[in-house]
Image (cartoon, rainbow, N blue to C red):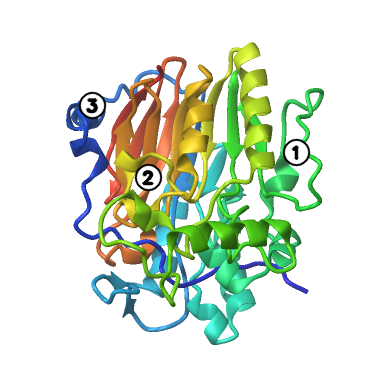
Amino acid sequence: MLKFKHSFRNSCVSEGRLIGWWAKGGKLTSRLTRTRKMDDSIQPLFTFGIIADIQYADIDDGFNFKRTRKRYYRNSLKLLRRANEKWRTEAVPPSFILQLGDIIDGFNKKYDASEKALETVVNELDKGEIEVHHVWGNHEFYNFSRDDLMSSALNSKATDGGMTDDVVPTGESAEESYAYHFSPAPRFRFVVLDAYDLSLIGRKEPSERYYQSLEIMQAHNNNDDLNHPPVSIGLEQRFVKFNGGFSQDQLDWLEGVLTLADEKLEKVIIVSHLPIHPNSTDPICLAWNYEKALSIIRAHKSVVCFMAGHDHDGGYYRDASGVHHLTLEGVIETPPDSEAFGTVYVYEDRMALKGNGRVTDRILMYP
């Protein structure tokens, strides 16, 4: 019986990319978010931890798909352990941890070690005795089927809280999405999105969404190996097999959740494995239909931040409506002498990200 899991392959490398905050005036806003002094004298409403792309495997160090970046497979567990120890000793214990996807590496599948690797990482997280909300990335699907994930420890949908009297239907489709929302404190809501609801790895035949995904790929990528981008530069790079998108049912559901959040005057943080703003990531790491997700977010005043992983270099951009798009650096490509995790302190008027190692401190003022 499957108890845990994660996945492999091209966990989005960012080479020679235009970093988001250098684009379209983002450089200044990024600099401000990084240099504004944090005020430790004010008690936060709550805090939470964030970590992305752990990609643990009990194998020797290796390289990314293009063999341009080193990956530290065993060391990623040590970095997670250090993050856990830091969270446990925080003056204000985190209310929960956001694990932004790719918790184990796809190489585990090759060695028939997926369940063992997942158990190892989940056991490490459990030592912190802090609730964890898991996001699913491409490596989850390299290791497990969607049905397996739904019955695994990576299904944190069961912790779904708040809005119990305001249930938002997920549509009439029989194909369930791994999307949910929860409220850790009054006037704050977190929405977890399923970025592989449309994908060739997150759906299988004879799924309607699989065939829809196949049509999308055939329209944009003619390569024999669909993990190779159709172009060498530009936004069309995103049409690769290791990415995915959001079904219309899920987008309709998101619209409903945000409408209720607007009415309740809540502040909403959305999380996904795939980034959705071109200036917050390398284009090759974007969700296929990122424009549709952005359009919905821009229509709702409740959204204050969108957090993602996938791009191991990380990224940041604050858009014209004031929404922060934060892409967290990946643990898997973090050297043993560094770190890659953060703690977010939530206040009435802002969030303060205290980064560790490769993760930069930022002050995220609400729009």
Query: Circle 1 sits in a helix, a strand or a loop, which is it?
Result: loop
Q: Earlier in the sequence, mark 1 or mark 2?
A: 1
What distance separates the C-alpha of mark 3 from that of mark 2?
A: 15 Å
Task: Answer whether residue 90 is visible to the viewer in this image.
Answer: no
Task: Answer whether residue 238 is visible to the viewer in this image.
Answer: yes
Instruction: Look at the image and tell me in which quarter the N terminus lies.
Output: bottom right
What distance separates the C-alpha of mark 3 from that of mark 1?
A: 36 Å
Dot 3 crowding, Cα within 10 Å, few <14, some 14–19, many 20+: some
What distance separates the C-alpha of mark 1 from that of mark 2?
A: 27 Å
Q: From the image, tell me which residue sits under label 2.
A: 327
Q: From the image, tell me which residue sits under label 1.
A: 170
Left or right? Give the position of 233 relative to 266.
left
Foreground tag (1 vs 2): 1
Q: From the image, tell me which residue sits under label 3.
A: 29
Q: Earlier in the sequence, mark 3 or mark 2?
A: 3
Left or right? Give the position of 1 relative to 300.
right
Dot 2 amino acid type: Thr
